[in-house]
Image (tube, rainbow, N blue to C red):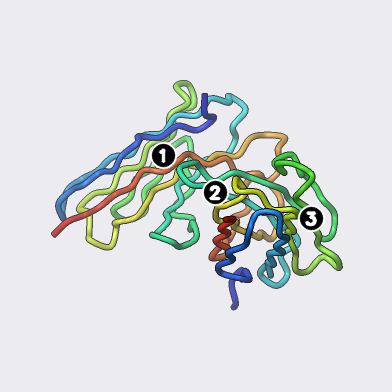
Amino acid sequence: EAGVTQFPSHSVIEKGQTVTLRCDPISGHDNLYWYRRVMGKEIKFLLHFVKESKQDESGMPNNRFLAERTGGTYSTLKVQPAELEDSGVYFCASSQGGSLYNEQFFGPGTRLTVL
Amino acid sequence: RKEVEQDPGPFNVPEGATVAFNCTYSNSASQSFFWYRQDCRKEPKLLMSVYSSGNEDGRFTAQLNRASQYISLLIRDSKLSDSATYLCVVNNYNQGGKLIFGQGTELSVKP
């Protein structure tokens, strides 16, 4: 069974540009999460989808970040305009249920560098 | 103060050594506890969940002390392949599936 996939694996953009990251969860997983790790810091939660609905977006840093999950399948995370501090690794994870006890499976991440 | 704190590391140990990782969490509402493993430039992968009674999986033993808000991971007879970053992760009641990560402790096992 295919795991969580993310695209692109790397992205290098200039400050002020727009970047869109994509995540394809494991088939059948209704719950999709975005996390981010900036250099030297811990992995931090960004938001949680249940199907196409945003369940929790408390971790989104500001309104330059927009996440969507149309149709409840894959998700995109757009950063517009990108700033230097947005550099980091963006992980997507999915799980079958959304409770405390459901294992989250992580994708390989997208490494974003903003110059 | 970070919600989940771990030993800063790195830990450099010889093969066969026993190594212990410590973690504390600040939110008494934390409900679920995990150790994840992350290899260099890879995604985190669940190593084991941690239960109040303590649990063991082969060479790995995890313990939870709710009173002290402390979690530990013990690796016995360490192998070269155990080299990775170990992440202490918690999940809080009423926060759905949101995972809260510690910064991780890097382990390097040398021959």
Instruction: Name which residue lies at 55% across and 56% down.
Output: A89
How many numbered marks appear? 3
Query: In the image, is B68 to the left or to the right of A74?
Result: left
Residue A9 place in picture, x, y as percent: 56, 69
Q: Nearer the viewer, residue B58 or A54?
A: A54
**Kind of residue sitting beneath label 3:** Val
Residue placed under numbered mark 2 in the picture: A37
Instruction: Name which residue lies at 57% across and 56% down.
Output: A115
Q: In this rendering, do the residues under marks 3 and 1 share a single chain?
A: no
Instruction: Name which residue lies at 70% across and 62% down.
Output: A19
Kind of element beneath mark 3: strand
Residue placed under numbered mark 1 in the picture: B54
Question: How many C-alpha atoms fall within 10 Å of the one at disc 1: few (<14), some, or many (≥20)?
Answer: some
| Chain under disc 3 | A
Location of residue A90 (image quadrant): bottom right
Residue placed under numbered mark 3 in the picture: A50
Q: Are marks 3 and 1 in contact (CB under 8 Å)?
A: no
